[in-house]
Image (tube, grey):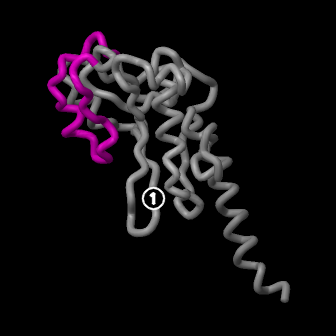
């Protein structure tokens, strides 16, 4: 299964991922159209400051999601086809128990009338695009969407290249 990985060491904290996410989830799906919409689009990813750096954070689509367990209306559910945590806004009653249950703060309350649902969370752009908008838009590649085995292999290789760089001298 593909998932989002973040290399915080190359994140510029430019917030391009937030903008791309907001635009991807607005009705017009264009920046110009988003500016003119009645309800301003909201990002489902947030670049949080950590010291002098930033860290993009969004739903981790947990194997044992506490938000799904806390959702009394079953608006949050695990999509069996993609193994991701999804949100069905029509079922949401706005109790925000999922907001309290998420250990990452990745589920957040939305203003009333904003897309007609009470909470918002990353959906990996499954219904919108082939790749999440945040990963596609990231100018440095700090956000990537790939299989975990491939990510692990790339990290091992990068570590070994760095480790052996001093030995070649």
Question: Seen in the image, is 64 located left or right of residue 128?
Answer: left
90 or 80, which lies in front? Answer: 90
In the image: residue 87, left or right of residue 53: left
As drawn, the residue found furthest toward the right would be: 168
- Residue 79 lies in the magenta-colored region: no
Q: Residue furthest left?
A: 95
- In front: 60, or 129? 129
Q: Residue at x 59, y 52 (%)?
A: 142
- Magenta residues (range): 88-113
Residue at the image position 68 percent from the left and 48 percent from the top: 150
Image coordinates for residue 147, horizontal then vertical, percent = 63, 41
Q: Determine the secondary structure under disc 1.
A: strand
- Residue 9 point in image, percent of width and height: 56, 64
Residue 4 horizontal/vertical position (percent)? 54, 42
Q: Position of residue 96 (x, y in %)?
A: 18, 30
Q: Please identify the quarter of the rendering in which residue 116 is found.
A: top left
Please indicate whether residue 56 sits to the left or right of residue 108 in the image: right
Task: Kindly identify the residue that appears in the image at 40 percent across and 24 percent down.
Answer: 86
The correct choice, above or below, for 102 with respect to 72 in the image is below
Quadrant in which the C terminus is drawn: bottom right
Q: Residue at x 23, y 32 (%)?
A: 98
Front position in the image: 23 or 71:
23
- Mark 1 lies on residue: 54
Q: Against 165, is 23 above or below? A: above
Q: Residue furthest top?
A: 90
Magenta stretch encompasses residue 108: yes
User: What is the number of callouts on the image?
Assistant: 1
* Camera-side residue of 66 and 135: 135
Q: Quadrant of the N terminus?
A: top right
Q: Main secondary structure of the magenta part?
A: loop
């Amino acid at each position: 299964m593909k998932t989002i990985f973040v290399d915080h060491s190359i994140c510029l904290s430019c917030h391009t991922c937030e903008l791309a996410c907001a635009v991807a989830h607005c009705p017009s799906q264009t920046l110009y159209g988003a500016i003119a919409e009645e309800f301003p689009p909201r990002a489902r990813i947030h670049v949080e400051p950590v010291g002098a750096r930033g860290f993009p954070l969004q739903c981790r689509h947990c194997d044992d999601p506490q938000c799904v367990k806390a959702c009394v209306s079953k608006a949050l559910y695990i999509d069996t086809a993609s193994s991701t945590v999804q949100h069905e806004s029509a079922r949401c009653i706005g109790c925000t128990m999922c907001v309290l249950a998420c250990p990452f703060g990745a589920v957040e309350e939305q203003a009333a009338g904003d897309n007609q649902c009470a909470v918002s969370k990353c959906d990996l752009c499954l219904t919108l695009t082939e790749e999440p908008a945040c990963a596609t838009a990231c100018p440095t590649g700090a956000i990537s969407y790939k299989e975990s085995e491939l990510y692990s292999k790339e990290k091992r290789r990068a570590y070994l290249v760095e480790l052996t760089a001093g030995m070649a001298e």
